[in-house]
Image: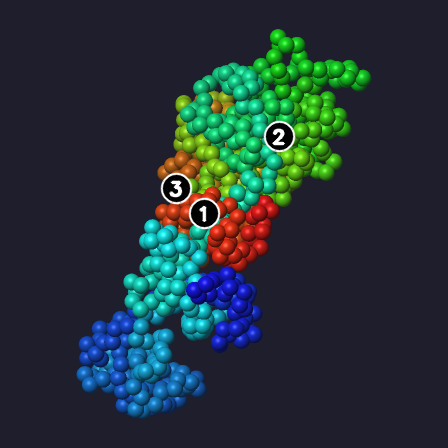
Amino acid sequence: MAGRPLSHLATIPVDQVKGIGPRSTKKLAEAGISSVADLLLHPPRRYLDRSQLFDIAAVPLGEEVTVGGLVMSVSRRRIRGNRQMIDAVIGDGTNVLVARWFNPWIKVQEGWEVVLSGKVERFQGKLQMKSPDMERMGSDSLLTGRVVPFHPSAGGIGPAAMRRSIWNALTRSRPIHDVLPEEMLDRLDLVDRDYAIANIHFPETARDAEPAKKRLIFDELFRLELALALRKQKLIDDTVGVMHDTSGELVKRFLAALPYELTSAQVRVIQEIEADMGSAHAMHRLLQGEVGSGKTVVAAAALLTGVQSGYQGAVMAPTEVLAEQHYLGFRDLFETAGLAPALQDPDTIEGQVNMFAEPAANSGPTIKMALLTANSVEVNFLPVGTAKRADVVGWIGDGTIELIVGTHSLIQESLSFDRLGMAVVDEQHRFGVYQRVSLRDKAEDYDPDMLIMTATPIPRTYAMTLYGDLEVSTLDEMPPGRIPVMTKQIPMAQMKQAYALIREEVAAGHQAFVVAPLVDESDKLEVTSATEEFDRFTGELSGVKVGLMHGQLRPAEKDVVMHRFRDGEIDVLVATTVIEVGIDIPNATVMVILDADRFGLSQLHQLRGRVGRGRDAATCLLMADPTTDEGTERLAAMVATTDGFRLAEEDLRIRGQGTVFGTRQAGIKDLKMADILRDAPLLIEARREAFAMVASDPRLENHPEAAAEVRALLGADVDWLFRS
């Protein structure tokens, strides 16, 4: 092997580098730098070009310059505060200047030839450099006469110490072996790794740093995508899937009975899912789409594909409110399609072993559904409130119930499925990895197909890293006739506008939401609270029925409030973000968000999506007096567009990319050099190359060094990815 690979350098502790002692080692480890490889992949944040020497007579004032000359005299004297001032007169034959330091440890002697870097000013008629960097001519300088890197501090280790440590590490590590084939480097116009690492830190010219940066950004993205490609391949190799029947009549009957035409995006995504479900490998697909883009119908078609194949379907939602919403949504869809079973008399259930016998041939199939949460249990073949939990659990276990909607209750050890073949996880970012795995593991001898849904639009580049191991389907088209929600930003002092709009809409027979950030008043945050606003709106809106909803209510209390609001017994619901997802009230036409600048952009978009779900025009009022630039930017973006994908890009730009895998609970370190928005073209290339490499060499037997690098540099995070 020509040189040392990064995987080897990742095994060498950072304390082996000259100049890094035990104390520095501990500090660097706390900052995530434990090995020589970590140190070499700690890039400079900026450079200062000190490679050009100016004649002292020609130096521009006030600019960073480098000059050289002879030390003609040195003087030291004490000044106020018991400090020491050192003046050295430097001449180069064209003029002289005074270099001045307020540092008793500066070593400079008359007769030395030196190079100085700093800003030149005129003081009392003389040229002066205050506190310049200085090196003796002929020394191995890292500070003068060259392009000087400035590395970010890490663990309390400053730029100067980082620079010297990285120089020492680089000197002993080169040449650095490249794990990518030359053919790939030539095709992608990338420099080799040894050049890249050397020139990202210590380029001979400022231009040399650019190709080095491009290569190391590619490497960072390539490692991530290679890990994802390996995980995807492992899923294919290790899973025993279900080959579902995609030609059955159940899905066709369901889709034909819908009272509206599917969008072309829905048709496309249903076909993508059917292709997955018809294969022998378990489906792992992400379905993303705007609020109101039709994800429920797509999920229903997927679940029915499983049922018509003789398997059960399960939908797991993060909250009871959302689970109940899904249950009601699916129940209504199946009733419309003529797939709902006839209601049974609960008093005659005991002893009737044939009550769930297949219906007569001429009546067609039906779907038996259940809702199962910690506090609710319902089935669609018994009157509301009459189902017993023990019975429902038994019917799930023996296969009588074909479709189950629930919360974490679905993954309790006491619950077993007969033949779980299709699992849907909604608002997946609210679940941990193990919860999704636990649902999948409810099928013991095979792996059920899994559809992960989110109503939070994800930028394409983010999806390629965050969910790069999944197939991604996107509903990027809204049903025709949907009226965009009008959005306005209004100062908090003009609350009367909100009252007037709510009165007007309630008088027209509509309903409204009012969202506050906190449940109770807080002395720490100057924000409104749901309880305070409930009192205020109740007082201001005389004759209007106002309800209160927040996360501290008991589940049963939440159910009562939501039922009353859904049934029209409440006109205005004052709530916290507990209603962010899963609430479908087509009659609601007003959303008032108080202290809106306190909310994240995706959260604001989700809240706005609670209104405008019917045929009437809706309005969202962002009540806010933003005090930060970010808050102002978020509100401006909300007013400018209702396109969730544009807002997701803007949110990513405003907040920064953070930890790429953070929301998957996978802890992969922050990208040090790459920015997935700025570097989208490189990300696309890295993904294509990584997946092509794994496609041709599934276990990287012909690329062992690339595999070793992924494991060495991503460490335990890769193991987590494979477990997830």
**Label 3 crowd bin: few (<14), some (14–19), many (20+), radius 10 Å:** some
> Residue 140 sits in which quadrant?
bottom left
The amino acid at mark 1 is: Met
**Circle 1 is placed at which residue position?**
693
Q: Earlier in the sequence, mark 1 or mark 2?
A: 2
**Label 2 crowd bin: few (<14), some (14–19), many (20+), radius 10 Å:** many
The secondary structure type at the circle numbered 1 is helix
**Circle 3 is placed at which residue position?**
637
* Disc 2 versus disc 3: nearer the observer: 2
**Circle 2 is placed at which residue position?**
421
The amino acid at mark 2 is: Gly
The secondary structure type at the circle numbered 3 is helix
Q: Earlier in the sequence, mark 3 or mark 1?
A: 3
The secondary structure type at the circle numbered 2 is strand
Cα separation, mark 3 vs mark 1, equals 40 Å
> Residue 261 sits in which quadrant?
top left
